[in-house]
Amino acid sequence: MPKKSIIMGKIKILNYFSLVWKQLERWIAINKLPLSIALLVSLLYVVLFDVGVREFSGMALVWKILYTTVQIFLFTLLLSRLKYVGGIIFALANIIVIVLQYAKIVFSLDLSPAIVNATFQTTWNEVLPLINIYIVLAILACLSLSFLYINWLNRKLIVAHNWWCLGGWLGLYVFYLLLPGMFAYKQPWVLCNTMTREILENPFLREHAEREYSWLWKKNVREHFLSPAFKYNRILSYTRDYFKNIDTQDPAVLASHAEREDEPMVFVLVIGESLRADHFSLFGYDRETNPLLSKIPNLYGFPRFYSFQTGTSSSIYGILTNADIEHPHATMKSFASVLKKHKFKCSLITSNYGVMTFFTAAHIQPSFTTFADSVTDCEYGNTPALKALSQAVNSSPRQLVVLQNGMGHFPYYCDERYKKYRPCDFNGDPPFQKKETMERMLNAYDNCVIGIDDFLARSIAILKDKRAVLLFVSDHGESFGENGRWSHCGPLTCREQRHIAACIWFSDKYRATNARQVENILSHRNQPLSHDHIYHTVISICDIQSQVQNPKLDLTNPEIETAKEP
């Protein structure tokens, strides 16, 4: 191509951009007042509602405020072109932000798959204590003001209403969202000025962040500087993952062998709710919360047991499948399939607010519930679950029972007979850090632990004359103000949300036939263990050896791979 033609092409491009810039200047001059008000509102929105700005300091805080302000500004201008539809979208988007910020302020919970999972599984019994007049008024105000604000902009802005105009706004908005990633790619000066306070103050995280630019872009720039747009993207992504059926193989098709296939055997897996180890007197807690378990022979605690995740459905998925912390996506369906292959019946019993919520998640259902011969959805409390357990273990000589007991979940309800520590009239209302609120909350929680102690003792009484094993593990722990966090669904670094209560009981008849397995399990009881070990150990406890098992995670083996402590 001739040099003159190249020069002429560049001149045409420059002339085009010059023309666009002049038109933009003219449009800004015409719409100076509404644009100024929109920009001011966007700045106030960021300062007042974007809790994420508190995670920054210094230059990073300035960049965060500036970037997010312009992002909100462009978002509102784009939606103003959609008239009434835009007002509705903006109102709904703000409600999502308000709810997320409420969770962030009250519980210090960040947006995560566990939070989205919990949202779909939460019942009114859990939500009602958290609803107050302030959050209701905030949502109503948000709905009305957002709608009025967007429609006011639509009327005040002088701009053509056509698809080309809307496409231009959308293109500008998307380009702006991509801007941080374009600049942050292997540009240390950008990264150093966008680090959160958590990364700056943690030598390990900072060293890792400076070495791994791609990790920092995902962890820091993308999550914080694309907020709130990235929040909506992550919500959609986590929602899709929640309903997605993960393709897993049936382990029953693999080779397996049962040593005592014709002998009676009952295995009961009790999954607790939000029960942390350091509130069990079985593990040294100064309050007597396990008056019954401490007196039961053949019952042994695991003082260093850790959960797969910090949310219920995610942890249940890790318990029932071969997913582990290093490989969080299961390749095999539940151990129930292997046990059914060798003449076991499978019963599922839940008693979590009367709703079988946590086993209906799409990624759990094909992995486990499809193998259940019976499903019992009990009312909340111990008595209905114990009745269902008794019926299940007496229905077949070879029986697998998975039982989820919801006692211990926020806001820590329990029957009157378990209320040893008072005052315990905790209704779940924040702020939790108040001295009197903390006292009531901890008393209510410890009373729930007493309730679980009674439940396990009575469950063992049902099994004591059988060849049986009962394994109890909590799904996750709970935070009581550590590092400003409350409840659960926090990051995996929250030790109190990962360090869970766990114990195992063997009947005399089982010990008589399986002395070696019992001895090996007990030899590991003081080592760091986790949900990762359950899948492989359950199969061996039931006298089955299968190709699906990982010997390094099977506690019946003399040598195992221990868990990494958070």
Image (cartoon, rainbow, N blue to C red):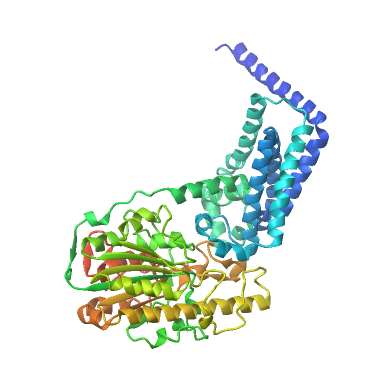
145 relative to 173 in the view: left or right: right
Residue 6 lies, with reference to residue 127, above or below; the image says: above
Q: Residue at point 68% right, 20% down?
A: 16
User: Which is more toward the observer, 438 or 144?
Assistant: 144
- State which quarter of the image contains the N terminus: top right
Residue 136 lies, with reference to residue 448, above or below; the image says: above
User: Which is more toward the observer, 394 or 106?
Assistant: 394
Expressed as whole percent of the image width and height from the top left, the position of residue 225 reads 63, 47
Expressed as whole percent of the image width and height from the top left, the position of residue 311 reads 49, 62
> Can see residue 189?
no
User: Which is more toward the observer, 101 or 141?
Assistant: 141
Residue 510 lies, with reference to residue 170, above or below; the image says: below
471 relative to 45 in the view: left or right: left
Expressed as whole percent of the image width and height from the top left, the position of residue 223 reads 58, 50
User: Which is more toward the observer, 290 or 205?
Assistant: 290
488 relative to 297 in the view: left or right: right
> Residue 435 appears in which quarter of the rendering?
bottom right
Expressed as whole percent of the image width and height from the top left, the position of residue 310 reads 49, 63
Q: Residue at point 49% right, 70% down?
A: 274
> Can see residue 83?
yes
Q: Most extreme residue toward the bottom, as rendered?
A: 295
How many numbered marks does the figure carry? 0
